Image (cartoon, grey):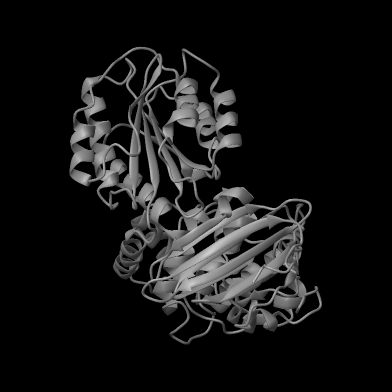
Amino acid sequence: MARLGQGSALALVFLVLFCSATVVFSQCNTQSVDRTLEDGATGGDVVKATADKIRESGIFGDDHEFLRRMAKVESDNGRIMGPGGIWRVDLETFKDVDVFILLQQETPTLQSQFEEHFCFSWSVEVTSREYSAMDVPLYSALTVMVYLSLTGQIIPQNTEQQAELWTEHLNRNGDEQEFISISRSLRDADNECRIKGVDMVFVMDESGSVGASNFEKMKQLAIDITESFEIGPDRTQVAWISFASYARVVFNLTDYSTKDTLHDAIRGITYGGGGTAIGRALETLRTEGFVGGRNNFDTPEVAIVVTYGQTNAGIDTSTAADNLRRDRNVNVFAVGVGTGVDTAELAIIASAGIESTQDRTQLIDGFIDNQLNILQQLIRARTCFDAMFSDNLQSIERLNAANVSIPEGVTVHVAVECPLEGLTVNACGRTGTTILYFSRSSSPNSANYEIIFTIMAGQCRNTYIDCVPMRIFMTVEGIAETNEYNLTAMTGDISTLQGMC
């Protein structure tokens, strides 16, 4: 029985034979595969892993996919050779950033933050290598982000404005239209839903501040969002909660199994009026919203809360949000419409979800076409694009699943609560070929992982993970046309017990 210690070779995990491994996840794990620090590494997985690492560090603001877009435009993710690495950092930009970092006085310094989050020393790994250090993906991308930060630039969400930023500050010879065109092609690929299904609940304000005409526009928004999903019992299911002074479930997840019947039901919802009880709406979402849901790790739970005003009735919003976050694993989008919305309360609504990042709260002036388009794109991208599930926190019980099906090209990301006793994970293939990546960093992929299972029909793998952070991340990829597997997760180290095979 092979066991992986901190000094052992990770190559053992590639064995197709059934074996177990022990992995200790630590801040700077020497066992990990991290191609973001590999000289000359290229490809879409490398770009995504690099952008994810920088975003998760929290050093900079949300780049709104700017790094992915720039990498594709500048070098086709590194496939077109040239100086400055994947992001084509020019020599003067590198020198400016290098001097800034070395001379920086205010604390915490970027050098100390890079050491803490990325486990490398800028002066040792970058300054000493000079410009050739830009061939390392993480160093090249960090240089872009530092340069924009020191010149006072905030990366906009809008693609056209990103194109202007790129040509004005990073590539004066760049073609804005090319940037926009390539960005749209990336967005189209992202918006092609690559997951099997979603349990989605709309929580819609029908209070007096909304009005009947705006309520009709809210219904159309829901229709537009669900248009990009395949509706059905094994695909995406949709429920609806309306709230005013009280909250009511209009229909449940299992009530409509086709897109036509769902959209007809949404069109038939009547407007009520009354006060604004957001806390009651969140409480109803927690207790009744996901009735009929699938309650497993590969079916994400999504709630879209749209409100016009501030709570003036019912229970406290913060208390309801805390209860929802404690009891369920929901991705919550909080959308405020108009000037009467309390932005602090909007943030509280989003905090009820498993990932309360800034883009989970959106404040729009009204139902204006361009703002609605941005909102729809955001929700589709965050729901369908696999990065959404990087923080989809699951209990051990929800991780256990039999006959899980994952189509070719589909990627699912989840996070798992890791108990003090550690965690034993066992995966057995039924059909096709499935790859499972594990890491302490979210969204592990072929460019960034700490352990990997490749399982085919009739083959099993297991590992004991002695968790150092209390959360681990798993990515599942389907390789063959059809792929099925069983997954079990248990507290403690039972990987050596007879019967695990």
Where residue 219 appears, x then y in whole percent? 25, 33
On the picture, is 178 further left or further right than 478? left
Q: Residue most toward the front?
A: 499
Quarter the C terminus occupies = bottom right
At x 32%, y 61%, the residue is 192
Q: Residue most toward the bottom?
A: 81
At x 45%, y 44%, the residue is 301
Asked which quadrant contains residue 128, the reply is bottom right
Residue 280 visible, this orientation: yes
- Establish if 119 lies above or below 323: below
On the picture, is 310 further left or further right than 470? left
At x 45%, y 25%, the residue is 284
On the picture, is 310 further left or further right than 266? right
Quarter the N terminus occupies = bottom right
Residue nearer the viewer, 311 or 169? 311
Where residue 364 appears, x then y in whole percent? 36, 35
